[in-house]
Amino acid sequence: MSSRESTLKHIRSLIYCLVNIEDTTGEFLQTLDDGRIIDTKSWNNPRYCSWEWTHGVGLYGLFKFHQVTDDAEAINLSLDWFRAQVLTRGTTKNINTISPFLAAAYLHELKHANYFVHLDSWGEWAMHHLPRTDEGGFQHITYSHINHQQLWDDTLMMTVLPLTKIGLVLGRPHYVEEAKRQFMLHIKYLQDLKTGLWFHGWTFDGHHHFAAALWGRGNCWVTIAIPDFIELLDLPATDGLRSFLVSSLVRQIDALVGCQDPASGLWHTILDDPSTYLEASASAGFAYGILKALRMRLIPHEEKYVNAAKNAILGVVDNITPEGELLQTSFGTPVFDNIEDYNKVKLTSMPYGQSLALLALTEHLRTFI
């Protein structure tokens, strides 16, 4: 079997597992104070609300695969998910629940569906009603926590990219300008000046980084979001913001190359702490971001970067079961006040784990095109 055929086989198995994930025991359900139950694990749970960032990342992976291969099944699976969710069933607007609108904006743009009313409503909410921190940052409000005055690196992927695409699709340049500002503000407060890696969170209420955790998956959202943002806006090489974003990305990738586990090709859940477990979903995100940065010439085609990407892909593939499940995927992770708690987060199959591997292998697939 050729490398291309093998990659496509792994992608098909990842998609199959993605859309068949279920929380059969209820272990990972989240019960809100108002009695609603949120299922962040199952792809489509008819009993509870299955509209979260976990699904948004899953939908984005499906769309990116369609974008590269013109695969019709990936589009149909996404449209089926939106129809089953009736777009707003049981959903509260927050940082994470806007995530599915990144894929929705692409589907609307290509006229696969008409999501105008929803894109308009959620875009306006993000611009005018989403709680803000000092300096106007997007406060990381979720279903269960207000997270007062907190910036998280997750926000760039879950809210800022969707707002950007909505702004482009609906012709609202002020959305795009706000997205640019959010990238700069998050870099200002979350990128570690010493290492180039990113802290998981920052709070203006006390001015600190909580446990100062250089958390793997939080970092991978950045490695994905910066190249995707530059591509979305088609920023030219002479653009000042592009240069600023690229310099931030290069510093992060240089640090990632230095802490990649040489035996597995993966990264630890706390990037600079080899005593914490190896985590495959973050590693898949890094593989995608580094490969894309190479393709877009955001980083030079140097051996250290190429090898890091190749080894990451090998590490991800080694953790895909015959049934298509990405192993070594940690469950959703809040900002903790100590490093030890990050290492206690359970490993389980999740839509975002499947999708991050899907994104990585889809970008890898372009090697053979």
Image (cartoon, rainbow, N blue to C red):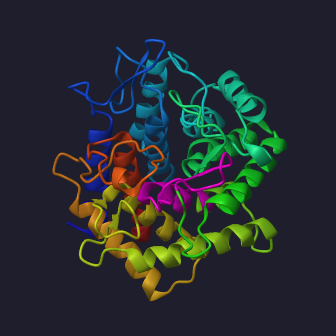
> Residue 82 or 369: which is nearer the viewer?
82
Give the residues in magenta: 200-226
Q: Judge whether 22 appears above or below 210 on screen.
A: above
Is 126 displayed left or right of 25 in the figure?
right
Q: Position of residue 294 (x, y in %)?
A: 53, 74
Q: Position of residue 195 (x, y in %)?
A: 54, 75
Q: How many marks?
A: 0
Q: At x 27% / y 45%, what residue is drawn? A: 346
Is 189 displayed left or right of 58 in the figure?
right
Which quarter of the rendering shows the N terminus? bottom left
Q: At x 67% / y 42%, what residue is drawn? A: 149
Is 210 displayed left or right of 118 in the figure?
left
Q: Position of residue 63 (x, y in %)?
A: 49, 44
Asked whether the viewer can see residue 347, the reply is yes
> Residue 236 or 93: which is nearer the viewer?
93
> Residue 136 or 55: which is nearer the viewer?
136
Q: Position of residue 222 (x, y in %)?
A: 55, 59
Which quarter of the rendering shows the C terminus? bottom left
Q: At x 48% / y 47%, what residue is drawn? A: 335
Residue 223: in magenta span? yes
Q: At x 51% / y 60%, what residue is drawn? A: 212
Residue lying at the far front in this picture: please name it: 206
Asked whether the viewer can see residue 362, the reply is no
Residue lying at the far bottom in this picture: please name it: 303
Residue 235: in magenta span? no
> Residue 75 or 14: which is nearer the viewer?
14
